Image: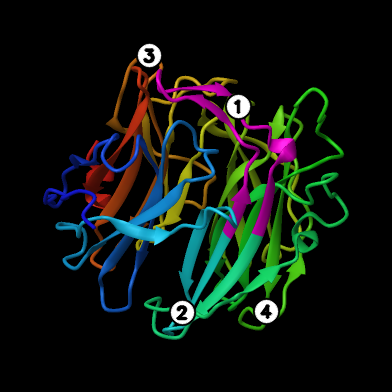
Amino acid sequence: MEIARIAPLAYKPGHLEYFQFIRGGVGADYHQGPYFYQFPEGDVLMYWYAYDFDEASNNCASLYSISKDRGITWSSPQVFMADYLGGVPYFVLMLRLRQSRRTMMLFARCRNDEIMVDEERRVQTTWCDYFKSSTRIFLRWSNDGGRSFDHGREIPYTDICGEKVLPGVGCYGSADHLMELKSGRILAAFMFMDPTRSDAEKRVQHYTGVCLLSDDAGRTWRRSGEISVDTPRGVMELQMVETGPDRLFCLFRTQGGYLYQTISEDGGQTWSRSEPSALPSPESMARMIKLQSGNILVVWNNVSSTTQQPRHPLSAVISKDGGRTWNQPRVIVDETGSNQLSNHGLIQLDDGKILLGISHYRDVRPMSSDLDMAVFDEEWLHNG
């Protein structure tokens, strides 16, 4: 099966290169939410969601492509994960443990309330009711660097949401971040719809953040203290970096006009009171990684809004002091009106190159979303 041929990309040290990776309408109307993983041998895996009409479509599948030359040429997309009966495989996170070929895969399987569509006009007519949707979390392990995985096991949703169970559903949320601390502790961050702060009758959602922590290489897990915020819809899409031994800096999406931040001084067990960061933002995700230099890189929509618009420009910013202060942002790409540049994925490869996969929504009926790719390095980030 050949979904598309991906044209070769390019990379020039100290410069930004920008490409359309795959066009919306090829294989699916929408291509969204790219993730990256680099195998021990250097090959790069990129995987993302492909769906028609809406991200809550229950026939959504995950596609993948592999680069054997560290991000320049890519294989034709193939199906990575799909499970129409069991639920959409969303939020697939992969982590190779330090100095090891042992790799962890954490993913959510979401069964969404059925949307309604008008096939002739190619439009959605009813939206998903997330209070009637459910999420199950699964853990799988690989001993060959991520080339193959065991059948895995399900993590009880009460390990994540505790006693805050949604009536008739159990849990609805996402797996947001997966990391190994210098101590060897594994941290998995989640958001879940909190029934104590949500209103099902009015369809008012409010999310709370939490981490699962393991100090025995993933054999057993315990629940951290919760991460909360008083802005509408709450805590969404947590991103974390370790800035010192057991010191974690966390950014997350809100409706507060800024990315909000919280800090842990004990390896993720407890978290400080959430507060606005210095980074203005709409209600849109950010992606944050720690670079090989030790600096922090954040890519996000650099504009303040308490709604989901506008989701442009897409900008990059560096912190040299663990998130306390930020350099002047650099614009990666811009858009206009209600078009969007968001739902992106970010990785720095072993050769220093940075890959940024971008969901590029075009608000022209029939709606679609391309998948774009930016290629740059830390030198370009400092050249502005």
Q: Amino acid at mark 3?
A: Gly
Q: Is residue 118 magenta?
A: yes
> In which quadrant is the C terminus drawn?
top left
State which mark lies toward you, 4 or 3: 3
Q: Of residues 273 and 145, which is closer to you in this image?
A: 145
Q: Earlier in the sequence, mark 1 or mark 3?
A: 1
Mark 2 lies on residue: 98
Mark 1 lies on residue: 127
Label 2: few (<14), some or many (≥20) within 10 Å? Answer: few
Q: Of residues 364 and 372, which is closer to you in this image?
A: 364
Mark 3 lies on residue: 337
Q: Earlier in the sequence, mark 3 or mark 2?
A: 2
Assign a secondary structure to mark 4.
loop
Q: Earlier in the sequence, mark 1 or mark 2?
A: 2
What segment carries the magenta color? 108-136
Q: Is residue 131 magenta?
A: yes
Task: Tell me how far mark 1 sits from mark 2, CA to CA.
Answer: 42 Å
Q: Amino acid at mark 2?
A: Arg
Using residue 193 as the reference point, say whether residue 126 is left or right of it: left
